Amino acid sequence: MTIQDSSTSLSLLRGSFKRFLPNPQAVALAIILIASFVLIYSLSDLLMPVFVSIVLAYLLEGLVSKAESMNMHRLPAVYLVFSVFMACLGFLLFYLIPMVSQQAVELVQQIPEILNRAQTGILRLPEMYPKLVSESKIQQIMFAVQRELLTYGQNVLSLSAASVVGLVSVMIYLFLVPMMVFFFLKDKQMLIAWFLQFMPRDRNLTVRVWEEVDTQIGNYVRGKFGEVFILWAVSYVTYATMGLNYAMLLAVLMGLQVIIPYVGATLVTFPVLGVAYFQWGLGGDEFMYVVIAYSIIQALDGVVLVPVLFSEAVNLHAVAIIVAILLFGGLWGFWGVFLAIPLATVVKAVLTAWPRIGDNSLDANY
């Protein structure tokens, strides 16, 4: 057997292994993704302030990079962006949240009167539609509603008993999270260099996946923050001008609805139209004006804001969004629902960058 025959046999054997065995970089990336998921899932309760700080620092990094592109040194850029972040946090804590909380308390205090008016209107249904609705059925429904509201009130009281623990947790977040955000921004290069020493040397695929994830998540987050702010501002100006009660609370709900597509828009319809109904009734022109204004805002969001703000972002199918909400909401509760779309975007970005059969772009490093 000649040397050339041996070389040919080795080449064929190597080719067979390359066909039947996965790319080592793909294996390394899969291990990194699985390890990251297990770490986040198992330590989410203990290290949630760290994860929140990393997410906030990642969001603010875009502003820091933009300031650096304008010939500003990184440290002054970090101080500037962090100062703006703290100013926004102060606005939320000392102005927006107290106002929204006050209006929410006022709305809850009006629930008995709202229920009485609703009960009066519902009890008139058997007289108006005797063939469709019976009085006994209406009484059963009202009894079930009252029982559910009583249970809800008991749950609220039980939660208030644990408010001290919740207050301590909030104070820890308010102290630790901004401090960690500052150091994540300030020492970004040092932290990345420390982290990379644990990564494999051949990480072309990992870098490519990260670039894809970074691009799509950045586009999504920037667009979503802009959409929330615009909807909140437009809704507040509209509702306040029309004299609608709880304008700030309803405007905040209008802004936050876009975080959970489809589901959020459906849920926020009830409080907006419900407040307008119990303030003016169905016979007043003001109620129709609110309905028209609400419909116009929702239409402008879908027709104008979403195409403009998310022109470069990954488009997710409605089924993928619903599955992501159910999956991540089941895993992490509120935070899972809150982060369902970004996490689904990460999954799609990974699948987009994952090497396909016949992809020879990584063969040079194999």
Image (spheres, grey):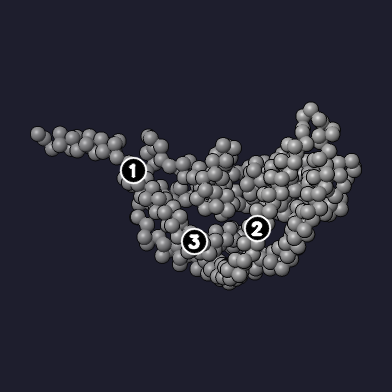
Upstream in the sequence, badge 3 or badge 1?
A: 1
Percent x, y of residue 130: 81, 30
In this figure, which residue is indicated by the disc labeled 3?
45
Query: Disc 1 marks which amino acid?
Result: Asn
Upstream in the sequence, badge 2 or badge 3?
A: 3
In this figure, which residue is indicated by the disc labeled 1?
23
Upstream in the sequence, badge 2 or badge 1?
A: 1
Query: Disc 2 marks which amino acid?
Result: Gln
Question: Residue at left 62%, top 62%?
Answer: 158
Above-or-below relation of 228 to 193: above
Residue 234 shows in this picture: no
Determine the image quadrant of residue 311.
Answer: top right
Question: Residue at left 66%, top 54%?
Answer: 152
Closer to us: 70 or 16 = 16
Percent x, y of residue 99: 75, 63
- Mark whose residue sits in front, 2 or 1: 2
Q: Decide: few, some or many residues near mark 2? Use Cα within 10 Å; few <14, some 14-19, many ≥20.
A: few
**Labelled disc at residue 154:** 2
Q: Quadrant of the C terminus?
A: top left
**In the visual, does 34 lie left or right of 67?**
left
Closer to us: 202 or 156 = 156
- Mark whose residue sits in front, 3 or 1: 3
Element class at badge 3: helix
